[in-house]
């Protein structure tokens, strides 16, 4: 550390110590510039509030509705922030890619044996006394009895109900937890738990290892997952993938808006609304998932045959060139 930086640092510490007890104070330091031999004196002023006894409990305040920025808390926040200096990119983001890759590997490794899965989404704020909690539990139980692994975000509310239903039926209960600014532990009904730092890695696991989504009443996160699945179906990235929105009364306003405004202004095609199934019946939801899975399996055979034929044709072409 140069003389200039050292003296400024010492002066600031003196001022900060003095102002820790009472408000405004000053400190003086003699500074010598590296480019000039003339010493200069400067005054550093700091203004702090009087010191108060520290309260017990958490020190970070999280606004549940609109968060005020204090500093990056989660890895997602750090990733999505623009670097403050050009050098920051070369020191952080390339190494962060390695961590992201590690999360993908861990997720793929833990879920590689899941060939029949259903992801159930919904609010973490749903109370066990809520009828939707009971409906999610029953839906998951029926799906687990049909041989489907139940995948959730591992949290409380609807997620807990779904994992509980899977365990009641003796099925596989999977939780994909996410790092949040406030602590979110996994619910006690998760058998296979995977922790993620990055939302997009976690969302990839939901899509990759699911044959259907069941969407219970929820907030922004639930809507995010629902519309991402609908977008992937609409753009042909996934096929015969049912998106079941459970709770007609809750979702009715959204569906009416999609019909009257979005479809009415031709932002989507009439057939796009057929991608959504509304229901209040756990048995209807389970039947829709089973039918879609059987349809998926029937469609896989010609696709596998076409892929095999293409590989054989390519192999024959390579041999003929030799």
Image: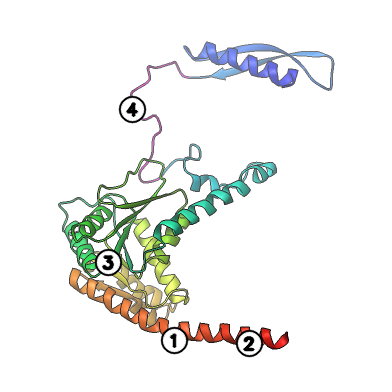
Magenta stretch encompasses residue 61: yes
**In the figure, residue 53 lies in which quadrant?**
top left
Distance CA(mark 1)–CA(mark 2): 21 Å
Residue 251 badge: 3
Number of dots carrying numbers: 4
- Could you classify mark 1 by the number of other residues whose Cα lies within 10 Å: few (under 14), some (14-19), or many (20 or more)? few
Q: Name the residue under label 4.
A: 57
Q: Which of marks 4 and 1 is nearer the N terminus?
A: 4
Distance CA(mark 4)–CA(mark 1): 60 Å
Label 1 sits on a secondary structure element that is helix
Q: Closer to the observer: label 3 or label 2?
A: 2
Q: Mark 1 points at which residue?
A: 302
- Could you classify mark 3 by the number of other residues whose Cα lies within 10 Å: few (under 14), some (14-19), or many (20 or more)? some
Residue extent of the magenta highlight: 49-66
Q: Closer to the observer: label 4 or label 1?
A: 1
Label 3 sits on a secondary structure element that is helix
**Looking at the picture, how far across and down is residue 313, in whole percent?**
60, 87
Q: Which of marks 3 and 2 is nearer the N terminus?
A: 3
């Amino acid at each position: 550390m140069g003389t200039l930086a050292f003296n400024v640092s010492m002066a600031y510490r003196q001022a900060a110590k003095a102002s820790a007890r009472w408000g405004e104070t000053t400190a003086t330091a003699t500074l010598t510039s590296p480019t000039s031999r003339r010493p200069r004196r400067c005054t550093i002023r700091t203004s702090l509030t009087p010191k108060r006894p520290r309260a017990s409990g958490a020190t970070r305040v999280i606004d549940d509705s609109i968060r005020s920025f204090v500093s990056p808390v989660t890895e997602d926040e750090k990733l999505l922030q623009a670097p403050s200096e050009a050098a920051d990119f070369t020191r952080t983001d390339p190494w962060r890619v390695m961590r992201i890759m590690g999360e993908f590997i861990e997720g793929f490794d833990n879920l590689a044996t899941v060939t029949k899965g259903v992801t159930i989404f919904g609010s973490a704020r749903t109370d066990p006394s809520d009828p939707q909690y009971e409906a999610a539990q029953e839906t998951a139980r029926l799906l687990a009895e049909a041989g489907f692994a139940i995948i959730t975000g591992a949290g409380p509310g609807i997620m807990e109900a779904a994992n509980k239903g899977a365990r009641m039926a003796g099925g596989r209960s999977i939780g994909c937890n996410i790092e949040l600014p406030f602590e979110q532990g996994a619910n006690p009904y998760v058998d296979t738990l995977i922790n993620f730092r990055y939302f997009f890695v976690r969302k990839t696991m939901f899509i990759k290892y699911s044959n259907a989504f069941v969407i219970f009443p929820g907030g922004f996160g639930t809507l995010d997952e629902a519309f991402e699945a609908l977008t992937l179906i609409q753009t042909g990235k996934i096929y015969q993938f049912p998106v079941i929105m459970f709770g007609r009364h809750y979702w009715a306003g959204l569906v009416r808006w999609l019909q009257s405004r979005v479809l009415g202004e031709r932002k989507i095609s009439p057939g796009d609304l057929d991608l959504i199934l509304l229901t209040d019946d756990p048995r209807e939801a389970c039947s829709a998932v089973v039918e879609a899975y059987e349809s998926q399996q029937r469609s896989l055979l010609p696709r596998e045959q076409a892929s095999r034929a293409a590989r054989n044709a390519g192999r024959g072409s390579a041999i003929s060139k030799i």
